[in-house]
Image (cartoon, rainbow, N blue to C red):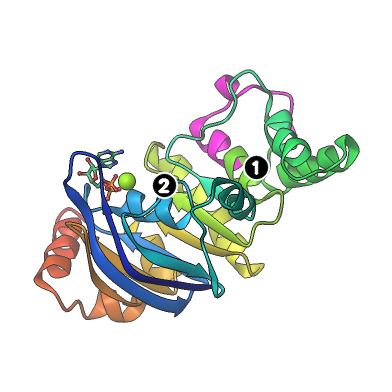
Amino acid sequence: MRVEFHNLSKRFDDNRTVLEPMDFTDDIHTLAVIGPSGGGKSTLLRILGGLITPTTGEILMDGAPISRDESALQRYRANLGFVFQQSGLFKHLNALENITLPLEKVHGYSKKEAIERASALLTRFGLENDAQKHPAALSGGQQQRVAIARAIAAKPKLLLLDEPTSALDPEYTTEVLDIVDELKNEGLDFIIVTHEMGFARHACEKIVFLCEGRLMEYGESAELFGNPQTSQLKNFLGKLLEWNV
Ligand SMILES: Nc1ncnc2c1ncn2[C@@H]1O[C@H](COP(=O)(O)OP(=O)(O)O)[C@@H](O)[C@H]1O
Ligand SMILES: [Mg+2]
């Protein structure tokens, strides 16, 4: 998907600038957004997802501007999949129903079609025996797998993930990242905010480094990790490596 934005910035009501004006144009297949906490990663992802509006600037997805009109925004969001740090599953619904509900209510699937699609995804993600379980009965990793199944069920044009593994125990992180990696092989484009540098480096083609509200570096992952240009990125990567075995 071609992602393009010009003079994009965000200031919240308290008047603090969270994103400084930034520009970007590229064809995205797999993009990781990395950087220190508070740097504006979630804010940028939410703006690209049409969940919040930027203070200035224009965003184009495959050449089409994201409108500020609420009904147009709703149609835009229906073409995307979202996965957040906490799964955001409906607690009173079981795994299967969590996936079928938006298919029926938002995407116009019949009940039968929705159940077929949801069951196929649950099986594919190794959750065929968990369809009737409520989120509280699932591990964190299983919950995130259901959340990803829900996000991709209607075949979105772009999947947006905001630290999908950061609330997970390490042993569950791999099972979730494996799924995201697999989706890429099917041609699903995604943008992921992550602190998993191994995943960013080896599974994502391109990287955006955001720091203190600035888009400091952008490029191919091998280039960015291998040859960081700014002191901020060198510093950030250096800190991450400090305790690596
Ligand atoms: N709704 C909001 N209102 C005011 N400030 C916000 C809001 N959302 C985020 N911020 C601030 O914006 C900055 C960037 O936040 P965020 O985009 O969440 O960064 P990151 O995801 O990189 O940690 C933070 O200082 C945060 O406190
Ligand atoms: Mg964040």
Q: Amino acid at mark 1?
A: Arg
Q: Which image quadrant: the C terminus?
A: bottom left
Q: Amino acid at mark 2?
A: Ile
Residue 154 image offset from top left, x and y in percent: 72, 51
Q: Is any part of residue 136 visible from this angle?
A: yes
Q: Is residue 8 above or below residue 68?
A: below
Disc 2 within 8 angstroms of ligand 1 (CB): yes
Residue 134 image offset from top left, x and y in percent: 64, 21
Task: Please tell me which residue is depicted at 41% across the width and 47% down the height of the picture.
Answer: 52
Task: Please tell me which residue is depicted at 57% across the width and 30% down the height of the picture.
Answer: 89
Spatial distance from mark 1 to mark 2, Cα to Cα? 21 Å
Q: Within the image, what quadrant is residue 146 found in?
A: top right
Residue 52, disc: 2
Q: Nearer the viewer, residue 28 or 199?
A: 28
Q: Is residue 23 above or below residue 95?
A: below
Residue range corresponding to the magenta coloring: 128-145
